[in-house]
Image: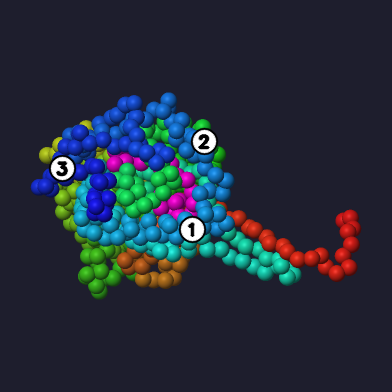
Amino acid sequence: MEKDKYLDWMRIHPWDTEGQSCSCAESRLENFINGKWITAKKTKTIVSPIDGHAMFQAPDTKKDEIDPFVSFLDTCPEGGLHNPFKNTERYRQYGLVFGKAANLLSSHFFADYFARLIQSVMPKSYAQAYGEVTVTRDALYNLSGDGVRDCAVWAGIPGDRSGQRAEEHRFPHGPTIIIAPFNFPLEIPALQLVGALAMGNKVLIKGASVASAVIEMFIRMLLSCDMPRNDVALIHCDGATMEEIIRQTRPAMTQFTGSSKVAERLTFLTRGKIKIEDSGFNWKILGPDCPFFDQSLLDYTAWQCDQDAYAASGQKCSAQSLLFVHTNWKEADIIDKIAECALQRKLQDLTIGPLLSIRTKDILLHIEELSHIPEFRLIFGGKPLEEHTIPEQYGAIEPTAVSLPIQALLKGETFRLATKEIFGPFQIIVGYKDSDIPTVLKIIRGVKHKLTAAIVSDDIVFINRIIGETANGTTYAGYRARTTGAPEWHGFHPAGVLAANIGTREAIREVWSYGRTIVFDNGSPPKGWEPTQT
């Protein structure tokens, strides 16, 4: 009976018994509101990005159906669902819920289920998909037991006299919204959701339509682990419907992960009550101190560059977009080593796959436009994938790298073209020498979206100089530095006042609560006190 409780929620089965993608067109996703699973007036078919076959039906919720979701947020009590002064037993309750969920994801059966489900809606290698499950599991373990209440720890300071003290508490925002992306359909929405719940918020969540099956199954799993049924609402809808909900409810906080263009629009719509993790144009510098003496380290660096640029087909907000290669690394044939790694990627194991937000012709057009820049060179790739069944609305291109001269990036129009957001397996490689370091820094400072960066060097003076003169939100430094692969044990966020952090307790506190100062002042007036006007 107890086992059935943890199996009943698995409504979407992405793979058949032989491990092949199967048609689940009869399966239906549902909205979740006020503790109940409901459908919408109309549904739409979600097709496989691999071959276009119908996978399942999803609610196509429209603006005339949003009243229950608006009411859900509007009825959130002042002070949220719990805080350090109200319903404090819920901190312990959620510690137990997250502990149960972590234990489920520790089972290979459930972990494999989510990994396969991720692959079906956002095709990536099994290792990449399973990595999402691992990070989510570990984040849940971190919040289990007393982990939730630890997020609400406060600081105090004595006052000027006996009976007076001040306490700095973390309070939930209250009614909140999460809008999640397609590229990490489990890890990003799951970590933001559990963080929001831990702090006492009431949450309406929307996943990207093509991948929202994953977050629905995660919510169903949390419910099987005894999560309170009225804390979360899930909606399957398009962007216009979601924006209308925001317009009508004015949530206290919206957390958005996705494109910079949509992020800018939502910033105005929410009047700045938003935390954003948008796409970055992420740079990596291979420093002057190339480890010629260590062949394994050279091979590792090439492998990591390939991973950063092309894992998940380059569809990571932290993907390596701009690689600065010092002449010493060129002499060590690092570019050839990167190419060797990249050319091993193949559609059969999804180490390269469909692009869900950009079409093949758009990437080819971008490469063609770059080719008019003097000294442009196509290093490898630049061709559509062959012998595939990927639907035409998605992109399918080989891992691609092009080379541009460093001086070209100082020109305004060239810089804007070169730093255009391409959410796919594409990077620009730029060579430099010691005297070019000021130019490298000038180019980096001109990049608008500052998410991740990597400084591959063991020279602490060089590392300190680059870090000290740049402003990325998350920077990796050292010979094993990368731009991707954010786990749950360190914060991960862009730079800026609206940056959404993710992963740690500090991130949860930053994004999902605000500081409330409470000054306690007790005792009798001082001896001899008399009222006077001041």
Element type where label 3 sits in the image: loop
Work out whether mark 3 precedes mark 2 in sequence or the reverse, and give the earlier one: 3
**Between marks 3 and 1, how big is the CA–CA gap?**
44 Å
Mark 2 belongs to which amino acid? Answer: Thr
> Where does residue 489 sit, x and y in percent of width and height?
38, 63
What residue appears at the point 24 percent right and 52 percent down from the top-left corner?
A: 1
Residue 133 visible within the image = yes
**For the residue carrying disc 2, how many other residues have a C-alpha within 10 Å: few (<14), some (14-19), or many (20+)?**
some
> Where does residue 311 sit, x and y in percent of width and height?
25, 52
Q: Above or below — where is 454 with respect to 193?
A: below
Mark 3 belongs to which amino acid? Answer: Ser
> Where does residue 107 sit, x and y in percent of width and height?
24, 59
Q: What residue does disc 2 label? A: 249
Q: Which region of the structure is painted magenta? A: 192-213
Work out whether mark 2 precedes mark 1 in sequence or the reverse, and give the earlier one: 1
**The quarter of the displayed image where residue 50 is located:** top left
Q: What residue does disc 3 label? A: 21
Left or right relative to 302: residue 422: right
Q: Residue 89: which numbered mark, if any?
A: 1
Residue 322 visible within the image = no
Q: Above or below — where is 379 with respect to 436?
A: above
- The reply to whether dot 3 and dot 2 touch (C-beta < 8 Å) is no
**For the residue carrying disc 1, how many other residues have a C-alpha within 10 Å: few (<14), some (14-19), or many (20+)?**
few
**Between marks 2 and 1, how big is the CA–CA gap?**
28 Å
Residue 111 part of the magenta segment = no
Left or right relative to 174: residue 365: left
Residue 194 part of the magenta segment = yes
Work out which residue is located at the far bottom of the displayed protein and give it. Answer: 293
